[in-house]
Image: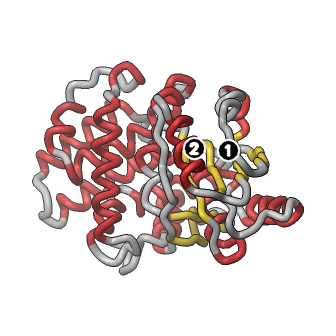
């Protein structure tokens, strides 16, 4: 609950030429005074952008680059990304490309970003309907996670973040998976902050061992090849499907594929399916929809081999 104080200590210890803060527009409205007590011996610039998946494109990045250059922001600046996954992705991409690399930190404000986008050093933008088709890998200097932001999240965002929590439980924490089974309804009251910390630390441990996604880190992709395909498919149909919802559906599908390949039991696959279908809406798809989703999945960046 003291992320602003931690940030204050960080910038006091590390002398930057200026701070360039990239805001999520909704966060700027909900938390307008978050930086009001921040003391910095350097100029502070602010840039507000819409925190939507539709903003993750080269036009948004180019507009921020131009703003940085207009204000003569030097290489030894600090870019501060305050917002959800979109802001962490865009801000990280801007930082790692501006003047061939500028330091940045992430302050995630959504459950999903706390568990996923803010950690791990993957920064990217979409090209057309393909998610994260272009990006960089570079770790932020720090990630400050503050639970106060969770209290202003809509239910849809809680559900989205929970999809990633399911993933971490299945790939790395049997006890967490057992605890999740007892949840009657997914909401902020039912989610323990300890779960968030355990999941985030698990991802950090994997990333520390395999930053460039050459082996062990592949485990973090569980649910994502099909999940990203479903997410991109919905974009083509002008429908909204949150990342975490898509990952939950991807987990459901990929678990069944694992059963078909004798990697898990049918009972385990059904348990996963039943849990996810109890909490998430399963969309109805046509054969034509399936063909398009299949083609999108083949182009997914996490898909290094022929898609099954």
Q: In this view, does 262 lie to the left or right of 301?
A: left
Instruction: Judge whether 50 appears above or below 76 on screen.
Output: above
Of residue 25 and residue 240, the one placed in the foreground of this image is: 25
Is label 1 in contact with label 2 (beta carbons under 8 Å)? yes
Q: Residue at x 71, y 34 (%)?
A: 28
Q: Which residue is drawn at 71% across and 29% down?
A: 32
Residue 195 position by quadrant? top left
**The C terminus appears in which quarter of the rendering?**
bottom left
Q: Which of marks 1 and 2 is nearer the N terminus?
A: 1
- Residue 297: give x, y in percent of width and height: 47, 67
Instruction: Judge whether 266 appears above or below 27 on screen.
Output: below
Q: Which mark is residue 51?
A: 1
* Mark 1 to mark 2 CA distance (whole Å): 7 Å
Q: What colour scheme does the image use? A: secondary structure
Q: In this view, does 293 lie to the left or right of 22?
A: left
Kindly state the secondary structure of the residue where label 2 is placed.
Answer: loop
Q: In this view, does 254 lie to the left or right of 124?
A: left
Q: Which residue is drawn at 25% across and 61% down?
A: 257
Kindly state the secondary structure of the residue where label 1 is placed.
Answer: loop
Badge 1 crowding class, 10 Å Cα cut-off, few under 14, some 14 to 19, many 20 or more, is many
Residue identifier under label 2: 84
Of residue 68 and residue 227, the one placed in the foreground of this image is: 68
Q: Report how many numbered discs are placed on residues in the image.
A: 2
- Residue 144: give x, y in percent of width and height: 48, 44
Instruction: Judge whether 114 appears above or below 2 on screen.
Output: below
């Amino acid at each position: 609950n003291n992320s602003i104080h931690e940030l204050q200590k960080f910038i006091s210890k590390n002398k930057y030429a200026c701070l360039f803060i990239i805001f999520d527009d909704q966060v700027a409205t909900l938390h307008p005074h978050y930086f009001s007590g921040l003391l910095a011996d350097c100029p502070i610039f602010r840039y507000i952008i819409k925190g939507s998946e539709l903003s993750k494109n080269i036009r948004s990045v180019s507009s921020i680059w131009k703003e940085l250059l207009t204000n003569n922001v030097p290489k030894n600046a600090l870019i501060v990304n305050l917002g959800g996954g979109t802001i962490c992705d865009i801000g990280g991409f801007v930082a790692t490309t501006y003047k061939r690399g500028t330091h940045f930190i992430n302050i995630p404000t959504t459950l999903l970003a706390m568990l996923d986008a803010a950690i791990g050093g993957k920064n990217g933008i979409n090209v057309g309907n393909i998610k994260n088709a272009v990006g960089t890998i570079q770790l932020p200097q720090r990630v400050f996670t503050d639970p106060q932001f969770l209290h202003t999240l809509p239910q849809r965002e809680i559900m989205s973040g929970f999809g990633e929590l399911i993933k971490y439980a299945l790939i790395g924490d049997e006890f967490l998976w057992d605890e999740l089974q007892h949840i009657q309804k997914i909401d902020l009251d039912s989610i323990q902050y300890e779960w968030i910390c355990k999941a985030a630390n698990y991802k950090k441990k994997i990333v520390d061992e395999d930053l460039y996604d050459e082996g062990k880190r592949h485990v973090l992709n569980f649910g994502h090849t099909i999940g990203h395909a479903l997410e991109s498919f919905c974009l083509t149909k002008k429908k909204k499907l949150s990342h975490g919802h898509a990952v939950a559906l991807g987990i459901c599908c990929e678990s069944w594929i694992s059963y078909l390949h004798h990697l898990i039991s049918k009972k385990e696959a059904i348990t996963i399916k039943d849990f996810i279908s109890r909490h998430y809406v399963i969309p109805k798809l046509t054969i034509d929809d399936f063909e398009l989703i299949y083609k999108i999945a083949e182009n997914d960046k996490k898909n290094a081999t022929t898609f099954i």
